[in-house]
Image (cartoon, rainbow, N blue to C red):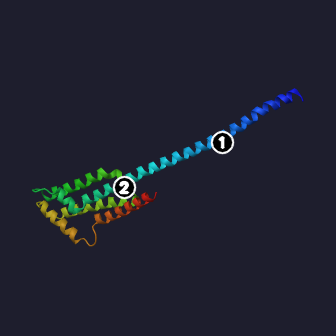
Amino acid sequence: MNPVIATLLEILKYTLPAIVVLLTSYLVVNKFLISDTQRKQIALLRETQDVSHRLRLQAYERLTLYLERIHPRNLTARTYATGMNAAEFAAAMNLTIQTEWEHNISQQIYVSRQVWETVRGVKEQELNMINQLAGTLKPEATAADLNRRLVEAVLSEPGELPTEVALQIVHEEARKVLSLGAVG
């Protein structure tokens, strides 16, 4: 046999198994790395969803608290002070509603547009109701007079108050998030 061919066969005898082992090792390691990467991505996705889920639930909690705080019966009890006139009382309630709103405005990124627009609408309705009722009183009217008008307006309201409807909407969406979170 030709010495060149013998040398080539001798080289192939050692390199061919090495190439097979190298390819096999490459495929096994590549499959392991892809599998490991996918596991890490899935774990990261779950962690991100858990954080997102918690933030959404906290947003619903904060909006629920906001709606409870601006409900007329709670708002008047927190802002009423003896000796106030009606204009001061109305201004105090408006300031309270607006301050609470500014404190919770970032929650809009965690809730649906419907919930956010509902809460915003309730805020506007509460402000309008206070200002309209205060506008019907004489300048010398006391805070007690405005408080009485607010109570009458709330009691004469047919159906549920806007804050109560909004609370139901927030609660319903929070329940959906909770049920999806339990499944996911």
Q: Is residue 22 left or right of residue 53?
A: right
Give the image quarter of residue 7.
Answer: top right
> Can the viewer see residue 172 in this picture?
yes
> Can the viewer see residue 109 in this picture?
no
Q: Position of residue 170 (x, y in %)?
A: 35, 61
Tag 1: residue type? Answer: Leu
Q: Which residue is mark 2?
A: 57
Give the image quarter of residue 120.
Answer: bottom left
Q: Is residue 63 left or right of residue 13?
A: left
Q: Earlier in the sequence, mark 2 or mark 1?
A: 1
In the structure shown, which secondary structural element does the residue marked by tag 1 occupy? helix
Up the image or down, 137 lies above or below 30; here it is: below
Give 56 or 157, whichever is nearer the viewer: 56
Residue sitting at x 26%, y 61%: 126
Tag 2: residue type? Answer: Leu
Q: Position of residue 72 (x, y in %)?
A: 22, 62
Q: Residue furthest right?
A: 1
Crowd class of label 1 (few under 14; some 14 to 19; many from 20; radius 10 Å)? few
Rendered-image quadrant of the N terminus: top right
